[in-house]
Every structure is written in C-alpha cells, then in structure tokens.
C-alpha cells in the first residue's frame, strides 16, 4: 500500500476544494487561512502536482485537483459515518424508527406507547418520510417500508400484506344516495389513493370495479390524495367512498368510523417490511423492537382477518369524540 500524505493536508485540501476558498476552509477547520494555504502547498509538493489555479481573487481546481477531490470527499464522508456508527453503538437508549407518514399516523403512533411501557429504558424517535432510509448518516436504527421486499444488502422481515377495498362513513350511507350494489358508486364521489403510484400497474378503482362486475361507473373521476391516510380521513368526514388500503384503515373500521359497503377486496401484491442493516438486527434495542412489532403484527393480522365488520354490526361512532386520533386502548 502506497504511503498516504499527512491527514491534515488532505483535510485542508478537501475543505478548500469544497468551498473554493482558503478563508472559508479555515473557518470550518478552525485555523488561519495561511495555515490552510501552507497545508495545501505541502500536499502539492508531496504529490508533485498543482491542485489549484490561484487567480487574483479566486481559486480553481486544476485537472489534478478535480481528479483527487471526489474520492477524497467521499472518503471523509465515510469516515464520518463510521465514527457516527460507533457513537450510536454506545447509545442503546435512543431508537430511531424510519417509516412512512401514513403508516406512522394510522398504525405505529397509536401503538408505540406499549413498546415504551415494556421498555422504559428506551426512548423512541419516529422519522416519518417516504425517502430511502440512510442508516449511517441519519442515525436510523430500523425502517418500516412498504413495497415488494427488494432491499438488497439488508436484513428484511415481512410484517403484513395489504389489500384494497371500498370504505365510507356510516353518515354517508345514512344520508344517501343508496349504496347497495357496485353500480350505485356512479352516484358517489370516488376517492383515489395515489400512494401506490410509485409502482407500475398498481391497482385502483378500475381494477376493483372490474372485479366487482360493475358497469357504468367512471373510475377516472373523484378526489385524489397522494397519502393513504388523507384519503381515509376524507372518507371519514363523508367526502365520498375511498378505495382504501386495509392496513391503514383497520383502526377506523374497527371503531366504526368507516364501514365497508361491499366485502370484495383486491390484492395489492405489496407488503410492509422491517428493514435493518445486516447484523444490526441483533443489537439489544433493535431486537427488542423486532420482538415487540412481531407480537403486535400477529395480533393485527388476526384483526385484519375479521374485518370488514358487517354493516349491521357496525356501530355509529360518537361524533362528539376526537375524530383525529383513535384511542390506544381501543386499538388493541
């Protein structure tokens, strides 16, 4: 292995190349501009190549500088991530969970208090976003993702499959128009869940209506939401009939905020998965969360098998109660 130039000189060059300024690099490294310039000059002498064109009031990277900078920048980033991993390894008190906003709102948040009750030594942090979880840079310990399970290079565990079915509020059924057959949907607003649009050929109202043998219903009209929980909440308020993801709507179905006018469900072909870096699944705090969510999901899958509740058994919810959250006790 070839000997490396001094680390301080490499750091000085990387910061200067990133800012294209000796003074701004000096501020970042907490040294003087002269010290940075001296370190860069020493690096150039060691390498036998000029790294910057020094102009009157600016500097530019030379060909050699442009060749060196990207890999060197990536190297310092990876060093930072490696050190951050060691920091997190020594801190088993905080568990960072990355998941989608809808799953967080409709499933995880109403249940997570039970995990904290069982493990008071752990503090949980939910990072709700749809982006790729960066376990290194963002400090994520475990991610819950919805998809086909293609997460190469990670430890992956399936949690629950999802499906689609029409749902609406009891109040909408009470005020009409009648909703006794799938054809009756032509007189109602269709609410579309576009959260599946990341997948080509994803199912929607057209597929459900075809499976139900419904004719004369324009599946292109209605309201569209790009988050699953938004469409569900709109249906709860009586805005129309939503073709909802059952996993997301299960709590509202159980509480009677939503009812299923038809029992037909269509598969999505996608599921929720628990994802961790390989080897990290055995870390104490992560293992505790895995054990807890597996128990919760086993109970939840039993609930899904019982839903939707036939409408004659569905109770009209108390409209004076808080509509925005469902109680943790009832969610059991």
Image: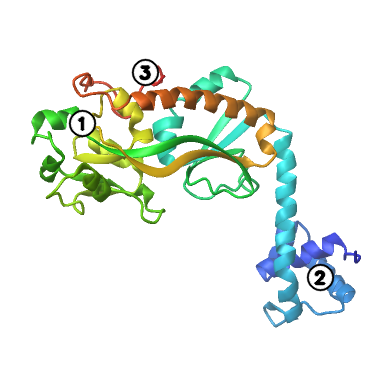
Tell me the quadrant of the picture where the C terminus can be found: top left
Query: Of circles 1 and 2, which is in front?
Result: 1
Vertical side of 318 occupied by 171: above or below: below
Badge 2 crowding class, 10 Å Cα cut-off, few under 14, some 14 to 19, many 20 or more, is: many
- Direction from residue 248 to residue 321 in the image, left or right: left
Q: Nearer the viewer, residue 280 or 71?
A: 280
Q: Nearer the viewer, residue 147 or 131?
A: 147
- Direction from residue 125 to residue 85 in the image, left or right: right
Q: Which residue does the image show at 11% across and 28% down from the upper left?
A: 174
Q: Nearer the viewer, residue 231 or 267?
A: 267
Tell me the quadrant of the picture where the N terminus can be found: bottom right
* Secondary structure beneath label 1: loop
Residue under pointer 1: 169
Q: Quadrant of residue 242?
A: top left
Query: Of circles 2 and 3, which is in front?
Result: 3
Vertical side of 324 occupied by 14: above or below: below
Q: Which residue does the image show at 18% across and 20% down from the upper left?
A: 312
Residue under pointer 3: 330
Q: Position of residue 94 (x, y in %)?
A: 62, 31
Q: Position of residue 114 (x, y in %)?
A: 50, 20
CB atoms at circles 2 and 3 under 8 Å apart?
no
Q: Position of residue 37 (x, y in %)?
A: 80, 70
Give the mark nearest the N terminus, 1 or 3.
1
Give the mark nearest the N terminus, 2 or 3.
2
Residue under pointer 2: 40
User: From mark 2 to mark 3, how far is it between C-alphas?
Assistant: 65 Å
Give the mark nearest the N terminus, 1 or 2.
2
User: From mark 1 to mark 3, how far is it between C-alphas?
Assistant: 19 Å
């Amino acid at each position: 292995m070839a000997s490396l130039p001094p680390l301080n000189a490499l750091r000085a060059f990387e910061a200067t190349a990133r800012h294209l300024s000796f003074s701004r690099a000096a501020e970042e490294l907490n040294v003087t501009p002269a010290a940075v310039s001296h370190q860069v000059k020493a690096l150039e002498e060691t390498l036998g190549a000029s790294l910057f064109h020094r102009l009157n009031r600016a500097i530019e990277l030379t060909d050699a500088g442009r060749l060196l900078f990207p890999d060197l920048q990536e190297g310092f980033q990876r060093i930072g991530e490696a050190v951050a991993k060691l920091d997190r390894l020594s801190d088993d008190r905080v568990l960072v969970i990355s998941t989608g906003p809808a799953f967080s709102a409709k499933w995880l948040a109403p249940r997570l208090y039970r995990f904290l009750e069982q493990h008071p030594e752990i503090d949980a942090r939910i990072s709700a976003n749809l982006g790729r979880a960066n376990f290194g840079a963002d400090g994520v310990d475990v991610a819950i993702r919805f998809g086909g399970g293609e997460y190469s290079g990670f430890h992956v565990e399936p949690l629950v499959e999802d499906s689609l079915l029409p749902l609406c509020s009891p109040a909408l059924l009470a005020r009409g128009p009648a909703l006794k057959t799938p054809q009756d949907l032509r007189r109602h607003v269709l609410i579309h869940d576009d959260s599946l649009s990341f997948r080509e050929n994803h199912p929607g109202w057209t597929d459900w209506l075809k499976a139900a043998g419904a004719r004369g219903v324009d599946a292109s009209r209605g309201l569209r939401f790009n988050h699953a929980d938004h469409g569900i909440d709109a249906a709860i308020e009586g805005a129309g009939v939503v073709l909802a993801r059952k996993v997301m709507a299960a709590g509202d179905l159980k509480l009677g905020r939503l009812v299923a006018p038809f029992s037909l469900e269509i598969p999505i072909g996608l599921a929720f998965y628990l994802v961790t870096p390989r080897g990290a699944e055995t870390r104490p705090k992560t293992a505790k969360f895995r054990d807890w969510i597996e128990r919760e999901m086993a109970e939840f899958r039993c609930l899904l098998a019982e839903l939707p509740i036939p409408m004659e058994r569905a109770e009209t919810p108390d409209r004076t109660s808080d509509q925005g959250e469902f109680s943790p006790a009832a969610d059991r």
